[in-house]
Each structure stands twice: as C-alpha cells, then as structure tokens.
Image (cartoon, grey):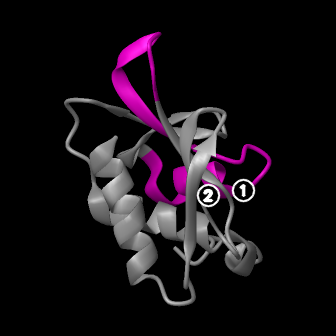
Amino acid sequence: MEFLKGVVIETAEETEGIDEMEVTLKWGEPSFVTKHGSTLRMDWKARAPDQVALYFQCTSRLVNTFRMVFDQKFQYEGNRAIVFQLSEKISVQELKECIRATLTYHDVKHLMTLGI
C-alpha cells in the first residue's frame, strides 16, 4: 500500500492543474481527493490477504473506461476497483493514467476515454 500511495502522490505532483490533494481516511481507508477529482481510496482486506485494491466511485465512468482502454492490463472488481496481487509487478505508467483520470475526473468526464 505504501508503494501505491507513493504512485498516487507522484501522479498528483506531475499533473497540471492539481495544486493540492487532500489525504485523509474515509471508512478507515486511505483516501485521496482533489478539487476537480473523484475520491480514490485504497485498502487491504483480511478476507483477501494476498491483494490490495484501489477503489473508485462506483457511479462514475472510471473503472469502465479503464477496462475499455487497458483491457486485460489490470484485474477489476466490478465497476469499483482495480485489484493487485501482492506479488504482482504493477504497470506503473498505465496505473498513473488511471489515477490522473480519477484526480481530474470532473474536468475530463466529458471526454470519451477521460483523457487517457
């Protein structure tokens, strides 16, 4: 989770238009939100001890768009999460695109692939 947190923070720092990001706990999970973005959460769950997940607002187009753009690059949980096995090598560049789309969602939601 520390690695994923670092990728989220790095992506926010690299993204034009993100001046600040709030890092907080939401439902006991580390959460990230920007002025023009959708909330991004992450968590490890005891029922699936070999994986961690990034959670997205399930009513958004985020996960469906990630699935359309990146197809089999990630493992998805419905329309709410990207799931990573602890032993998995993560495709950082593609993940950063997903994170960027989330942190700027309200500015890119009108675009077919959310700017990815």
Q: What x and y, as percent, mark residue 31?
A: 57, 49
Q: Residue at x 67, y 69 (%)?
A: 37
Mark 2, secondary structure of its residue: helix
* In this picture, residue 21 sits left or right of residue 64: left
* Depth order, front residue of 36/20: 20
* Depth order, front residue of 76/57: 57
* Depth order, front residue of 6/101: 6
Q: Quadrant of residue 38?
A: bottom right
Q: Does residue 111 appear anywhere in the picture?
A: no
Mark 1, secondary structure of its residue: loop
* Residue 83: mark: none
Q: Give the vertical position of 41 relative to 92 (above or below).
A: above
Q: Which residue is mark 2?
A: 65
* In this picture, residue 103 sits left or right of residue 57: left
Mark 2 Cα-neighbour bin, 10 Å: few <14, some 14–19, many ≥20: some
Three-letter amino acid code of the residue under disc 1? Arg
Q: Residue at x 49, y 62 (%)?
A: 99
How many numbered marks have been drawn onto this rendered protein structure? Answer: 2
Q: Give the vertical position of 6 relative to 108 (above or below).
A: above
Q: Quadrant of the N terminus?
A: top left
Label 2 near label 1: C-beta < 8 Å? yes
Q: Give the vertical position of 103 relative to 70 (above or below).
A: below
Q: Residue at x 30, y 46 (%)?
A: 2
CA distance separating discs 1 and 2: 6 Å
Q: What x and y, as percent, mark residue 5?
A: 38, 53
Q: Which residue is mark 1?
A: 61
- Residue 37 lies in the magenta stretch: no
Please give the range of residues in magenta. 44-71
* Depth order, front residue of 22/60: 22
Q: Does residue 10 appear anywhere in the picture?
A: yes
